[in-house]
Structure formats: structure tokens, C-alpha cells
């Protein structure tokens, strides 16, 4: 029987250049989707999947993330005095959702290096990892689906979607490897941004992983790749040559790369439309826009 996945690593040390000037003084992961920051959606989905510890790999500009998942006694007192019990409950639950651990990355050396920084906390356990600006809505939650596959096979699992969009060939890494069953594939290689003429399949790896602890020793020995940085996909390819790695095409999922401005706007619209208190007003506003007439 494989060990339960208890820990999630989320690299959040990036400086968010694509969202400047909004991210000059505020982390991109704290940008709101409707009324909750991006990072909170990731944490809520992880906790719903059974994750107990959230390890956030941060930088010196990311203090707001730490504060968000900490208690704010002054705010709680004011909300209580004003009788705003619903808001008080929402604020207080943040620090209780999971055990939060914050690790500083130091110099930004790539997403692989960020994951490696979490090794002392993860120790010798298999663990989950997600990128801090990728919001993946699914039912059941994305990590739960990946954890189910890990429990079946006992090896690393990549979150994937099916796509034949030509523009996606320059956005994602695509999985090369045989089908195992249904939506499960054995990974031989993940080819990053291959371009439309060299896509090996319609299976794109996106934003969430279950990884065995062997990934840490691979990351330590990995030569810097593009931009002189340590990339997690490069380490996963090496891992796939040493032990089985699986790709899972998740069901009922919707992916938003919230590091991209247009995707971030789409996420706000979709999540607002899913909220009863905003839906009718937003639909009316969209219909009333002059650009649609």
C-alpha cells in the first residue's frame, strides 16, 4: 500500500512581470478572482483533496501571501464588533484550512529549483506540486484525481488535458507515450512547446503533479536549461527514464493560466457567472455592451 499524499508544494517566488504594474508591490498570486486571491483557490482545492500541509516557496516580495493565511486579530475584532459574522467566519477559516509552511527560494533559479527548496520539509515522501498562477477547476478536485491514480500505480502522475488547438502547441508540454487504460498514459517524454508540426500527441501536461521523492536528487544534479534555470519538466523527463511516470487526462476540468492577462480576465468572468448573486447582473451587462450590438 502506497503512502498517502499529505503535502503540496506551490512555488510562488516569481516576480509577475506580465502583470506589472499591478504586481510591483503585490504578489500575482494575490490578484483576486472575484473576491478571493488566486492562491486561495489552489489551497481550497488541495484541502478538499485531502492535503494536510501546504508548502509555499516564496520570495522577499511575497509577505502578503503569508499574511493572508495567518490570523489578523485586529480585523477579526472589528468584524465581530460590527456584527459581520459571515465575513468573520471566512477570515478565521483561512489559517485553519491546513498547516502552512513558508520556505524562501532566494535567487530565482527556475521552477525546478523552487521545488527543490522544499525538500527539507517534504523529506522522503511523495508529494503534490502545483504552479501558483494556474487555476484548474474540476470535479472531483484536480489533486484528488491525480492522487487516485498515484494510489493505484504508486508512481509520479502528471495532470493533463486533451487539446488539438494549434496555438496550444506553443504553450504547453506534450506527452509522448503509450496508453495504459482509459485516460492514463505511460510517459516516455514530455516535449515542451513543440510547435504544431512536432506535437507527439493531443495530451498536454498542465500545472499539477504528484511526484516521488526521487525528483529531488535528479533536480540536484540537473544541468541548468533554458535561461540558465532549473526546470521541473526537464527533471520529470529524467525521472521517466528511471521509474514509471504516468499522465492522467483529468475529467470535467477547466484550466486558467492566470499569469496571462486574458486568461485571468476569463477566469473572473467564468467564476462570477457561477455565482448566483452576480450571474444575472453580469449577463445583463455583457448584453448591454455597445461592442456586441
Image (spheres, rainbow, N blue to C red):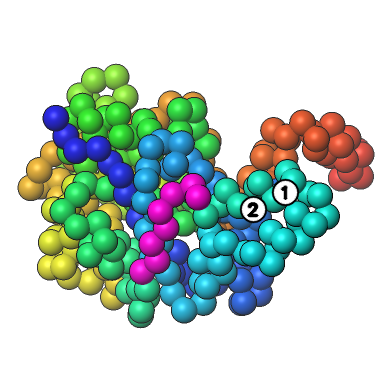
Label at residue 91: 2
Residue 84 visible to an observer of this rendering: yes
Q: Residue at x 69, y 50 (%)?
A: 88
Asked whether 53 or 88 is in front, the reply is 88
Q: Is 157 located above or below residue 178 in the figure? A: below
Residue range corresponding to the magenta coloring? 96-103
Q: Is residue 99 magenta?
A: yes
Mark 1 surroundings within 10 Å by alpha-carbon count, few (fewer than 14), some (14 through 19), many (20 or more): few
| Location of residue 120 in the rendering, given as x and y in whole percent from the top left corner | 22, 65
| Location of residue 99 in the rendering, given as x and y in whole percent from the top left corner | 40, 54
Mark 2 surroundings within 10 Å by alpha-carbon count, few (fewer than 14), some (14 through 19), many (20 or more): some
* Quadrant in the picture for the C terminus: top right
Q: Residue at x 92, y 39 (%)?
A: 288
Label 1–label 2 contact, CB within 8 A? yes
Q: Is 67 located above or below residue 89 in the figure? A: below
Q: Is 230 located above or below residue 204 in the figure? A: below
| Location of residue 262 in the rendering, given as x and y in whole percent from the top left corner | 64, 53
Amino acid at each position: 500500500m502506497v503512502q498517502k499524499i499529505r503535502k503540496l508544494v506551490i512555488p510562488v517566488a516569481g516576480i509577475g512581470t506580465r502583470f506589472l504594474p499591478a504586481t510591483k508591490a503585490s504578489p500575482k498570486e494575490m490578484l483576486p478572482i472575484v473576491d478571493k486571491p488566486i492562491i486561495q483557490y489552489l489551497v481550497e482545492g488541495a484541502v478538499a483533496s485531502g492535503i494536510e500541509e501546504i508548502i509555499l516557496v516564496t520570495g522577499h516580495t511575497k509577505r502578503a501571501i503569508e499574511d493572508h493565511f495567518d490570523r489578523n486579530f485586529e480585523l477579526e475584532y472589528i468584524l465581530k464588533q460590527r456584527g459581520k459574522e459571515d465575513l468573520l467566519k471566512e477570515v478565521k477559516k483561512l489559517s485553519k484550512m491546513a498547516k502552512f509552511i513558508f520556505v524562501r527560494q532566494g535567487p530565482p533559479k527556475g521552477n525546478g529549483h523552487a521545488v527543490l527548496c522544499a525538500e527539507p520539509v517534504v523529506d522522503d515522501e511523495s508529494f503534490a506540486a502545483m504552479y501558483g498562477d494556474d487555476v484548474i477547476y474540476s470535479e472531483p478536485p484536480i489533486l484528488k484525481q491525480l492522487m487516485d491514480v498515484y494510489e493505484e500505480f504508486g508512481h509520479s502522475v502528471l495532470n493533463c488535458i486533451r487539446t488539438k488547438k494549434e496555438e496550444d502547441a506553443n504553450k504547453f508540454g506534450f506527452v509522448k507515450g503509450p496508453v495504459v487504460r482509459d485516460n492514463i498514459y505511460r510517459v516516455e517524454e514530455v516535449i515542451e512547446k513543440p510547435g504544431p508540426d512536432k506535437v507527439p500527441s493531443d495530451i498536454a501536461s498542465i500545472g499539477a503533479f504528484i511526484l516521488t521523492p526521487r525528483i529531488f536528487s535528479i533536480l540536484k544534479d540537473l544541468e541548468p536549461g533554458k535561461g540558465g534555470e532549473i526546470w521541473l519538466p526537464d527533471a520529470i523527463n529524467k525521472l521517466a527514464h528511471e521509474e514509471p511516470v504516468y499522465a492522467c487526462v483529468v475529467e470535467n476540468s477547466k484550466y486558467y493560466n492566470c499569469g496571462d492577462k486574458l486568461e485571468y480576465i476569463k477566469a473572473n468572468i467564468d467564476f462570477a457567472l457561477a455565482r448566483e448573486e452576480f450571474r444575472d447582473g453580469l449577463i445583463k451587462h455583457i448584453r448591454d455592451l455597445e461592442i456586441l450590438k
